[in-house]
Amino acid sequence: MTNQTLTHFDSTGRAHMVDVGHKAETARVARAAGSIFMQPATLALIRSGSAKKGDVIGIARIAAIQASKRTGELIPLCHPIALTRVAADFVIDEAQNAVHCEVTAECFGKTGVEMEALTALSVGLLTIYDMAKAVDRGMRIDNIRLLEKSGGKSGHWLAE
Amino acid sequence: MTNQTLTHFDSTGRAHMVDVGHKAETARVARAAGSIFMQPATLALIRSGSAKKGDVIGIARIAAIQASKRTGELIPLCHPIALTRVAADFVIDEAQNAVHCEVTAECFGKTGVEMEALTALSVGLLTIYDMAKAVDRGMRIDNIRLLEKSGGKSGHWLAE
Amino acid sequence: MTNQTLTHFDSTGRAHMVDVGHKAETARVARAAGSIFMQPATLALIRSGSAKKGDVIGIARIAAIQASKRTGELIPLCHPIALTRVAADFVIDEAQNAVHCEVTAECFGKTGVEMEALTALSVGLLTIYDMAKAVDRGMRIDNIRLLEKSGGKSGHWLAE
Amino acid sequence: MTNQTLTHFDSTGRAHMVDVGHKAETARVARAAGSIFMQPATLALIRSGSAKKGDVIGIARIAAIQASKRTGELIPLCHPIALTRVAADFVIDEAQNAVHCEVTAECFGKTGVEMEALTALSVGLLTIYDMAKAVDRGMRIDNIRLLEKSGGKSGHWLAE
Amino acid sequence: MTNQTLTHFDSTGRAHMVDVGHKAETARVARAAGSIFMQPATLALIRSGSAKKGDVIGIARIAAIQASKRTGELIPLCHPIALTRVAADFVIDEAQNAVHCEVTAECFGKTGVEMEALTALSVGLLTIYDMAKAVDRGMRIDNIRLLEKSGGKSGHWLAE
Amino acid sequence: MTNQTLTHFDSTGRAHMVDVGHKAETARVARAAGSIFMQPATLALIRSGSAKKGDVIGIARIAAIQASKRTGELIPLCHPIALTRVAADFVIDEAQNAVHCEVTAECFGKTGVEMEALTALSVGLLTIYDMAKAVDRGMRIDNIRLLEKSGGKSGHWLAE
């Protein structure tokens, strides 16, 4: 990582939305994951809701997809991106008292979609927090990370 | 936690924005915290930037404050809230190769501001990820949690 | 209706956001309703989805609630309003091959929430159209109307 | 319509923003129509306003065009779209005591613009309701439907 | 102006949304003004349009009012505010080849509405630029300033 | 400028988002400039802040970049645009007691980016006003203008 610099700043240190006009348009994919940990009783409430009524996971999924489209408004130096696909999967993990979420975002464009995947993921988990907070304020959102990305000049990247 | 139910759903399991019209307006405060972990060289870049040029932390702070005002748009069942104060502190931790963030949100109103604090926090940390991702895609956002809240019928709550 | 004028325009015909600063804050409620009509097979798909998987109605409900919070952005002369409650009910009507929707919006404030209820309703029905349009482009949204409103100087109003 | 499924859900029933990355970019057009019915005296107010002062129709037209650009924020599973043209026509119909609206939306892209046309139309009609509601709360928005669409794999579609 | 500091920063220089929770709610008014200067032929086009067709001024007025409601999203450290009135007047000035605009914003709250008036004003003038730019790219927006404000602890202020 | 008309209106004077579907996609650049004038003591506060703490200029730069992405929401007849670069430079001018700002916006598309540059510029200057208004309400934003644009059928344009 020698001689690395932060590309969101020009040579005098001023933030800018970096020039991507010259970049090729390629198919781009990003996958991100994260989890929310909670009390066993809270997880039980969410799980029963998903099966019968009070669909916490279904609402979190919609919130995640919706948030992916607002990424450029939330993250100051992100470019606006025409997403071509967003999917959010949630897995209820009784062993760890957690809900795990994985989001995949795709576009065909000049910049990557890592932030779109991560923003969707974060808002999806926050939505679970919101719905269950009245019974469990101590929930913890953890381990938000990029799993994989492909496309663009930097090519394929896979988390170790 | 016996007989608990998720208040965002009515008795038939349908989601709604719960009625807070009858609640008293009180001073409400929420504090939330979280961290982003990274490579030592990435942290060094952020630290040097903050001192001289390329102010990653300053931009993340603005992104966090701005996001707090969009909470109701992002989290489906949140009420719109007239925030009266938002502050975001970031601490660079060389021992752990992390940036820690703490957000305080306040309002005088009928509902709490936990989600506003947590949303600001998440977007602040995502903004750091965005700015440093070109040099370190493996950064991890961790331990997002509520520290404390006060105001409203449920009163004071402090994380253990 | 003699001597009526449109209050969104001043005496010279210029549009404005009318002054409500002097109005009393009162509890305000509005109920609106509307329907979407479709092919029997389309309704069957929606109905089976709601029961088992592919929850069209659940997503339309979230879209409706979310839209109520954006009313002031969409309707040019609406005041921003701090909604205290929004609920959206959907009824599947096999006899008429329709989904009927009713939205209730509430606030405690200086202006009514009719537009919030009607905007939520419209976006909820449009969301159903979006999800089913690949199998039935000829669906029709009909009979969007206010059912009832209360609060404010004009008091209670009930549709005939 | 045998073997039809709702494409906004995957094989396990989970909602997603469907993958359009592989679709060809084609010229796409959608036309939608709808009406608002009212008291004769209300229509007279709107008509006189449009001619001289208090331009209800002009404001509704701007609201419709503005709303078309927010479609992806309002309809949860819509893709963001770069619209290339939006036009909204309103016709005052004294025989039926109605204002009829027709919206045309166009883009060159991977997905259709039906929802953009329908969303613009709905918000345009809601804006008329908003401006005239102080004199006529019983107005009714009716017959919102797609008239025609072209472009994309499904090709041309014309309402019967 | 001795010992003045910028209140949007805390004692260590960090930006925050300043605490207004303790402030009294008072009636607040702000008036702002500004102008756009252009070629005589451009002004003639705008003037004829306003009279007969192509209502540039009417559209700019709606854009100004709409923008006032987005102030908190645009100006990073502004508080969200429940505006109770916004009005925008435009005057065509043939002697100076200009359109002058004045915006008045009002609320009953804990913070002033100067930024709401100035933001509405700026967007109103930019909208005129947008509509006429195809015939006159050299237009100039000038003299954007606060004329007057009242309410709050700092009381009445009038531009000299 | 004979026979000029305002292209945002059709032949009957109705506003529309003009059809750009047939236009070629070209590289497009726009540069805009403007200034804010203030008391010498205000400028000194801003200048000291930028050097040490309370970074007014840094925050105004982020606000400008963020606003460029919202142009289509603010300016009614603007097309949504996928910006590929935005940069905002601020110069402190002690001789004139002013901060000068210049914004460059770029895209590769069917329409120009003049409004994106001008909107970013205006919001950047308004953000400076917001941060310093508590010590100097008499600041004046002046001379907002396009400096240069290139790309598209009308080609290169440079302010005299």
Image: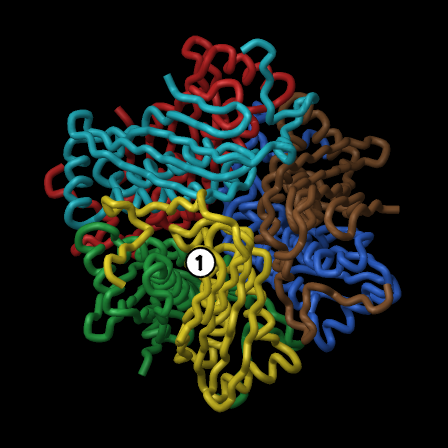
Chain colours: A cyan, B red, C green, D yellow, E blue, F brown
Crowding at mark 1 (Cα within 10 Å: few <14, some 14-19, many 20+): many
Position of E76 relative to F79 (above/below): above
> Residue A18 in the image: x percent, y percent?
62, 31
Position of D99 relative to B49 (above/below): below
Which of the chains bears the disc numbered 1?
Answer: C
Q: Nearer the viewer, residue D112 or E60?
A: D112
Position of D95 relative to D127 (above/below): below
Residue C155 seen in the figure? yes
Position of C112 relative to B99 (above/below): below
| SS at badge 1 | loop
Rendered residue at 21%/70% (across/down)? C93
Rendered residue at 64%/38% (across/down)? F131
Q: Quadrant of residue D160?
A: bottom left
Rendered residue at 65%/50% (across/down)? F110
Rendered residue at 45%/74% (across/down)? D34
> Residue F77 in the image: x percent, y percent?
63, 59
D53 left or right, relative to C37: right
Which residue is tagged 1? Answer: C81
> Residue C90 in the image: x percent, y percent?
25, 63
Mark 1: amino acid: Ile
Q: Quadrant of residue C91?
A: bottom left
Q: Quadrant of residue E42?
A: bottom right
Q: Outermost residue toward the left? A: B2
Residue B64 seen in the figure? no
Screen quadrant of the N terminus of chain F: bottom right
Q: Report the number of discs.
A: 1
Q: Nearer the viewer, residue A11 or E64?
A: A11
> Residue A91 in the image: x percent, y percent?
23, 34
F34 left or right, relative to A16: right
C102 left or right, relative to D40: left
